[in-house]
Image (cartoon, rainbow, N blue to C red):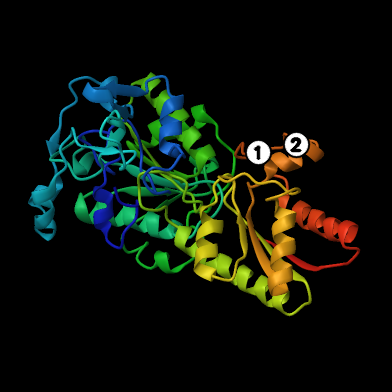
Amino acid sequence: MESAIVSSPISLLKPSISSGSRPGFNKGFACFPSAVAHGSKFRPPCTRVAAMTSNMKVVKGEAGYVLQDVPHITDYIPNLPTYPNPLQTNPAYSVVKQHFVNVDDAVAEKIVAHKNSPRGVHFRRAGPCQRVYFEPDEVHACVVTCGGLCPGLNTVIREIVCGLYQIYGVSEVLGISGGYRGFYARNTVNLTPKFVNDIHKRGGTILGSSRGGHDTMKIVDSIQDRGINQVYIIGGDGTQKGAAVIYEEIRRRGLKVSVAGIPKTIDNDIPVIDKSFGFDTAVEEAQRAINAAHVEAESSEDGIGMVKLMGRYSGFIAMYATLASRDVDCCLIPESPFYLEGPGGLFEYVEKRLKENGHMVIVIAEGAGQELLSEVIRSSDQKDASGNKVLQDVGLWIAQQIKMHFKRKNKRTINLKYIGT
């Protein structure tokens, strides 16, 4: 399965992980994966979101085959008519006709398996199907971006709009401004291919964004009043939880409305797909901080440069930036627990590297070592507007512990430069 965004509107041919559907013409609540490689221990946000809905489908087959499916419009609107995919009459995409996805195709969560192991968990394969559930002239779509910013947001918006207009013949796409609040604040902009033509060259999101502001009833009332029947929601974990709740209310009202959740995470922590949009940019920018830390470290006696990188509970940005830099001596990530004192501890390794090289660079992911802080610092239950737990500054704490260790053991002061991104 590919990432959610490629360089052509043909990316919109990925239909979600529901059967017989597609972005723009999918049924029910879908989640377009946009984070980590096969075999990761992380569960995709789209799986977590679907699991929160009361109608999550789990299909079991022979030899341990498990399909984690998503809800469909046909679950509550039976006998919903289907229509030929507009791609079949679009000469610009004649090659695609040879590669329509079968409704029973699935993608394995893990690509490595033992000959005696069960077949394992699978997800619906994304791609163009021969039949769709909306005719082009009945589609009234909207796009909204929520939560924090991420490189590539405008590219995602552009792909959705151009794909709907140019591939599927849709003529009305609304942009909801300011996140979830924009639904009931009546903040909209008409999105056309001409309007979004150059937006991929800009940072941020042309629609604006915000955290929180989720009022399910007001949002669904607005969707119903405006006659919207396709909702594209771009955001992180909190946003996708909100998307699932919106779908449940739409289902309760029996509306023919598709809700497509497009995960936004530069952390690259969604399995099965290649990588999430914005991840490459995050890794590239992280190297600037690492380079600065390296210059500081090698310019001082017993110099240590420490860089804290974002990623919450996944260490992909930290690890890939480390591999790209080649100047990092130690990379601390949440997936690999560590300790400070004793044989094999961080302090011992820092002493060893300073003795051998005279300086060193440490990269730490923001979610690494949080359990060490909880042992000495009272855990905080503070959450941001999206409901995510606010993490303690582990980098600053470890930097202080390293300084104290050398002062206590060696009676000397080290030169440590800390950069928290």
Q: Is residue 68 left or right of residue 343?
A: left
* Front-most of residues 213 and 61: 61
* Front-most of residues 361 and 253: 361
Task: Inspect this view and state whether residue 121 appears.
Answer: yes
Residue 206 image offset from top left, x and y in percent: 47, 58
> Marks 2 and 1, how far apart in space?
8 Å
Task: Inspect this view and state whether residue 282 appears.
Answer: no
Residue 382 image offset from top left, x and y in percent: 72, 37
Where 392 sits versus 104, above or below? below
Q: Is residue 92 left or right of residue 288?
A: left
Question: Are the residues at dot 2 and dot 1 in contact (C-beta closer than 8 Å)?
Answer: yes
Where 207 sits versus 358, above or below? above
Q: Which mark is residue 389?
A: 1
- Residue occupying the point 79% across, 57% down: 402
Pointer 2 or 1: first along the chain: 2
Where 394 sits versus 75, above or below? below
* Front-most of residues 195 and 392: 392
Dot 1: element? loop
Q: How many marks?
A: 2
Q: Which residue is mark 2?
A: 380
Residue 87 image offset from top left, x and y in percent: 14, 49
* Front-most of residues 411 and 366: 411
Dot 2: element? loop
Q: Which mark is residue 104?
A: none
- Residue occupying the point 44% across, 37% down: 43
- Residue occupying the point 69% across, 58% down: 349
Type of amino acid under label 2:
Ser
Badge 2 local density, few (<14 within 10 Å), some, or many (20+)?
few
Where 20 sits versus 314, above or below? above
Type of amino acid under label 1:
Lys
The quadrant where residue 399 appears: bottom right
- Residue at far bottom of view: 299
